[in-house]
């Protein structure tokens, strides 16, 4: 299943140091243009999802809703994380590829949910 591949890429990206996590760090990466893709947990607060959806649309950064806070945190190597930003273009392209192959469809403004 693609979710395993996505989590694997997120973990690899974190180990390479090409990922930031946490709302403040992700928002900063989006604003300064270093974020190549943003992933927000499906169980995040509505206001958090809305914030990143609007920021990513404005700055034209791919935005995805995927997984849950505990899983994102686990694969990033932290306790739990609501949002992550991929800083490397190669990792971002691969994650976007896996997201669009599965039941996640999101490019420039449309929300994505993991349908299992």
Image (spheres, rainbow, N blue to C red):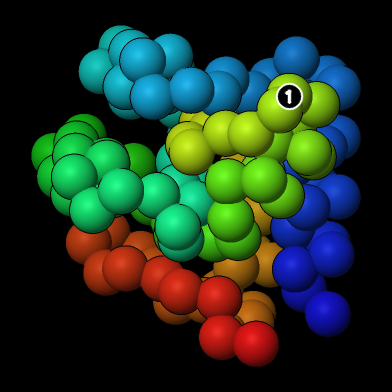
Q: Is 42 placed left or right of 48 in the picture?
A: right
Residue nearer the viewer, 18 or 49:
49
At mark 1, the secondary structure is loop
Q: In the rendered image of this protein, does residue 24 appear above or below residue 76?
A: above
Q: Which residue is mark 1?
A: 78
Q: Residue 29: percent from the left, percent from the top?
A: 39, 17
Give the quadrant of the N terminus.
bottom right
Would you say residue 52 is visible in this rendering?
Answer: yes
Place residue 5 in its image quadrant: bottom right
Residue nearer the viewer, 44 or 10:
44
Would you say residue 37 is visible in this rendering?
Answer: no
Q: Residue 38: percent from the left, percent from the top?
A: 45, 41
Q: Residue 91: percent from the left, percent from the top?
A: 70, 40
**Mark 1 nearby-residue class (10 Å; few <14, some 14–19, many ≥20):** few
Give the quadrant of the C terminus.
bottom right
Q: In the rendered image of this protein, does residue 12 appear above or below residue 69?
A: above
Q: How many marks?
A: 1
Q: Residue at x 64, y 79 (%)?
A: 101
Q: Is 94 placed left or right of 106 in the picture?
A: right
Q: Residue at x 45, y 57 (%)?
A: 43
Q: Is 113 placed left or right of 102 in the picture?
A: left
Q: Residue at x 84, y 64 (%)?
A: 4
Q: Residue at x 64, y 23 (%)?
A: 19
Q: Residue 18: percent from the left, percent from the top?
A: 69, 20
Residue nearer the viewer, 26 or 91:
26
Place residue 12 in its image quadrant: top right
């Amino acid at each position: 299943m693609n979710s395993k591949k996505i989590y694997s890429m997120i973990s690899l990206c974190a180990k390479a140091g090409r990922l930031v996590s946490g709302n403040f760090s992700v928002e900063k990466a989006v604003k300064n243009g270093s974020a190549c893709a943003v992933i927000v947990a499906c169980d995040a607060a509505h206001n958090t999802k809305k914030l990143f959806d609007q920021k990513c649309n404005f700055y034209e950064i791919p935005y995805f809703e995927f997984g849950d806070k505990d899983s994102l945190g686990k694969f990033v190597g932290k306790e739990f994380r609501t949002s992550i930003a991929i800083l490397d273009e190669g990792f971002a392209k691969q994650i976007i590829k896996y997201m669009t192959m599965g039941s996640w469809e999101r490019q420039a403004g449309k929300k994505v949910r993991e349908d299992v």
